[in-house]
Image: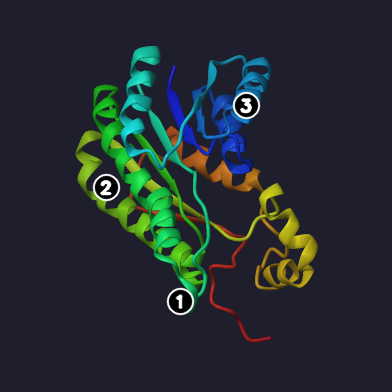
């Protein structure tokens, strides 16, 4: 049975991704600093999908803890077929107000931790005969928004393309998904306090709605599957068409 590691597995996108991969037959490992929430998701997946699902407490800021995380997966399952770098954060929005501590924290979580996880996961994927790495980027790489967040996500797409070029010979595919603003519990307060923002995203989206965690999870599950076996180095936009240039009325 194939094995997938999902970072930020207790969050909306991570949990939806873990469930969808489990439905496709993967055993899933949910890594999250919120270990109790992750455990609840894993327990539900085991019950409903009848596959192995485990939660691991993981602080991705602690780079020294990442190799032991991968090693624990090797010890328990003997393989790793899919890595989903989903955990992330926002912040450092305005250039006049960027604080180095916040800037460094954003890059550490959104870019450095994924790179190190890839570095530690690749040998196990090679030994498993190949695999798939999916990085959760963002539509903001096209349009720009907060200085720190945008920079980190553009960097993540650069990492995706570099690794795709390097790891193809090992039958390891590396892709990214780029969601737009989503209707998630994380964004619930934003939507409630600034309905105009949500309406603005709907207006620039040809499909006329906000995305959901399941929309993103579906894209990730596709890229993790054999149906995407000839796709690597790509960015799959999960944003209802809002990646397109605006059209005249």
Near-viewer residue (190 or 126): 190
Question: In this rendering, does residue 23 appear at all?
Answer: yes
Specify the label residue 163 is tagged with: 2
Residue highlighted by disc 1: 95
237 sits to left or right of 109: right
Nearer-N-terminus badge (2/1): 1
Specify the label residue 38 is tagged with: none
Query: How dense is the environment of label 3, judged by Cα within 10 Å: few (below 14), some, or many (20 and up)?
Result: some
Residue highlighted by disc 3: 36
Nearer-N-terminus badge (3/2): 3
Q: Quadrant of the C terminus?
A: bottom right
Q: CA distance from mark 3 to mark 2?
A: 33 Å
Near-viewer residue (113 or 217): 113
Q: Quadrant of the N terminus?
A: top left
Expressed as whole percent of the image width and height from the top left, the position of residue 202 reads: 71, 67
212 sits to left or right of 9: right
For mark 3, give the secondary structure: helix
Q: CA distance from mark 2 to mark 1?
A: 30 Å
Q: CA distance from mark 3 to mark 1?
A: 36 Å
Which of the 4 quarters of the picture holds residue 2? top left
Q: Residue at x 53, y 58 (%)?
A: 90
Which of the 4 quarters of the picture holds residue 205? bottom right
Q: Residue at x 74, y 54 (%)?
A: 188
For mark 2, give the secondary structure: helix
Which of the 4 quarters of the picture holds residue 167? top left
In the figure, 2 relative to 218: above or below?
above
């Amino acid at each position: 049975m194939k094995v997938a590691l999902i970072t930020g597995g207790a969050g909306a996108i991570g949990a939806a991704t873990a469930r969808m991969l489990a439905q496709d037959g993967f055993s899933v490992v949910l890594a999250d600093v919120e270990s109790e929430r992750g455990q609840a998701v894993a327990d539900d997946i085991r019950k409903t999908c009848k596959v192995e699902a485990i939660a691991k407490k993981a602080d991705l800021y602690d780079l020294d803890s990442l190799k032991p995380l991968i090693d624990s997966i090797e010890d328990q399952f003997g393989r790793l077929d899919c890595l989903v770098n989903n955990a992330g954060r926002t912040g450092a929005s305005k250039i006049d107000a960027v604080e180095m501590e916040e800037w460094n924290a954003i890059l550490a979580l959104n870019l450095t931790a994924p790179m190190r996880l890839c570095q530690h996961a690749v040998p196990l994927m090679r030994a498993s005969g190949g695999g798939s790495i999916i990085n959760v980027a963002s539509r903001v790489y096209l349009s720009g928004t907060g200085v720190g967040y945008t920079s980190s996500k553009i960097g993540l797409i650069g990492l995706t393309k570099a690794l795709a070029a390097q790891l193809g010979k090992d039958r390891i595919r590396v892709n990214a998904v780029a969601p737009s603003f989503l209707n998630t519990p994380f964004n619930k307060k934003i939507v409630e306090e600034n309905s105009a923002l949500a309406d603005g995203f709907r207006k620039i989206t040809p499909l006329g709605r906000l995305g959901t965690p399941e929309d993103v999870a579906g894209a990730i599950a596709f890229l993790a599957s054999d149906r995407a076996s000839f796709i690597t180095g790509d960015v799959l936009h999960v944003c209802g068409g809002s990646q397109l240039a605006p059209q005249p009325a």
